Image (cartoon, grey):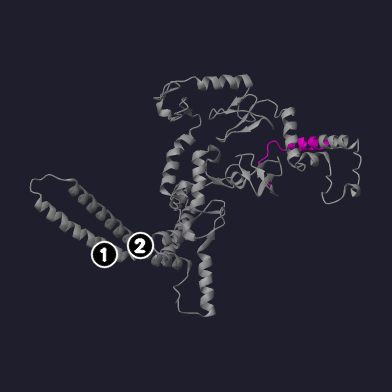
Amino acid sequence: MDRESELLLLEMQLEDLNQLVAGNDAMNCNGDRSDYDVSLELLRQDLIDRITAHKDRALCSSIACALNRDHPALEHQREMENSALQDREMALSLDQDPTTARTAGQDPHNQQEHLLDDETLVKLAMRYNSEEAGMSILGFDNDDASDTSPAAATRRALKQAAITRQCTACQDNFKICDIARAPCSHEYCGECLGAIFTGAIGDEAYYPPRCCRQTIPLEKVRMFLPADIAQDFQAKVPELETKDRTYCHVPNCSAWISPDHIVNGTGTCDCPADEGTQQLLEVARGQRWQRCYQCRRVIELNTGCYHITCRCGAHFCYVCGEPWKTCECPHWSEANLLARAEQVFDRGNNQADGPNAAAGHIAAPANIPAAAVTPEPRPDPFARVYQEVRREREVRRIAEELRANHDCYHEKWRFINGSHDCEECGHTLPRYIFECRGCRMRACWRCRRHRL
């Protein structure tokens, strides 16, 4: 149904409802309002709101059409004004008073407009006006559907290619008005973009929402996000932007306490006190666990160097808890470094499952007589010693690589087939995983793009 017909139907419904309300008011002489009267009034107000929204949309569509039609003239006028502005700056620079030239030359630059690019204009026109309006910005005219010539088919194919984009995450094709472009030029559909922002709300390691280490601003992609996700993310930003955050210590509450509700280092919450947090901190001190100086999370280190990257984004030393590279503590423990090297070696040298496979045993086929089976070869007494020596040598080599790359920025990755676990989020990837060429970390596609 077109917009004009829908607006006409709404206006006819409102007219019938007004007549019904007027007749009901005439019958009700005592002035008391029943539930029926209230429901009629609510329905009437809903119809008025919908009619107003339709008229506002029609006005916006008219303005958009006018802008599309006058866009070349406006762009030409802007270029002429910029040319005149440059001529004025040149004349002022030749003036004898340098102070006047500098002062006059600064203001135009500070007032320079940030214009929308053509792709954004196309998306806005297609979402809030019509597909034809977007096509006119791209330079495509309306084609005759009855034209079956090869030239017309080529034009339609070019038109379809111009308005179709592929989502980087799900690999599905969408119209250009339904897909957002990140600062790194990767494009995401509304559902995958919503998953990125939802992940940033639930897991601080994904905040701020980013792709290829470049932040995705909410104001640039808000029109592609569901309204509830955008509102939840905007409400979560003050908490995530607070460096030294305070939360309620009661496990059933754990609410964030705003700095406005903290007086003299003490936050106020309506929850009863418990001793669970203090017991946890006592255990942490006994086990020599460390707390993040920024978000105060408790962190345990099992393998690897002392460079800790917290979920909140803070980098600190595991030994003293100070920001990374601001102390004189050692960068790694040899025991932890060797444990990590053994872990890397073992995951790439897994033997076949089963006790027989581990011992090198070859079972006799069931369909061959026992007398015809070749006797098992005698085990080599030096094979196990050789394997242990080889393992130790490889572990040492991997440890030296990890030592040299303990400050890895994860810039180069290799693709590995098979089922593997992501070392960041813990999820199991059934088909493939990425491994950093520097520090040998294995991460899923999501953590690689939006977390590391």
Q: Secondary structure at mark 1?
A: helix
* Crowd rating for badge 1 (residues with CA inside 10 Å; few <14, some 14–19, many 20+): few
Residue in the picture at 52% in, 65% down: 162
Task: Point out which mark residue 61 bears.
Answer: 2
Residue in the picture at 44% in, 64% down: 134
Task: Point out which mark residue 8 bears.
Answer: 1
Q: Is residue 355 magenta?
A: no
Residue in the picture at 63% in, 32% down: 308
* Quadrant including the N terminus: bottom left
State the image quarter where residue 410 is shown: top right
* Crowd rating for badge 2 (residues with CA inside 10 Å; few <14, some 14–19, many 20+): some
Q: Amino acid at mark 2?
A: Ser
Q: Secondary structure at mark 2?
A: helix
**Depicted 161 relative to depicted 255: above or below:** below
State the image quarter where residue 257 is shown: top left
The span shown in magenta is: 393-412
Residue 86 in the image: state x and y as whole percent.
47, 57
Looking at the image, can residue 384 be seen? Answer: yes
Residue 191 in the image: state x and y as whole percent.
49, 51
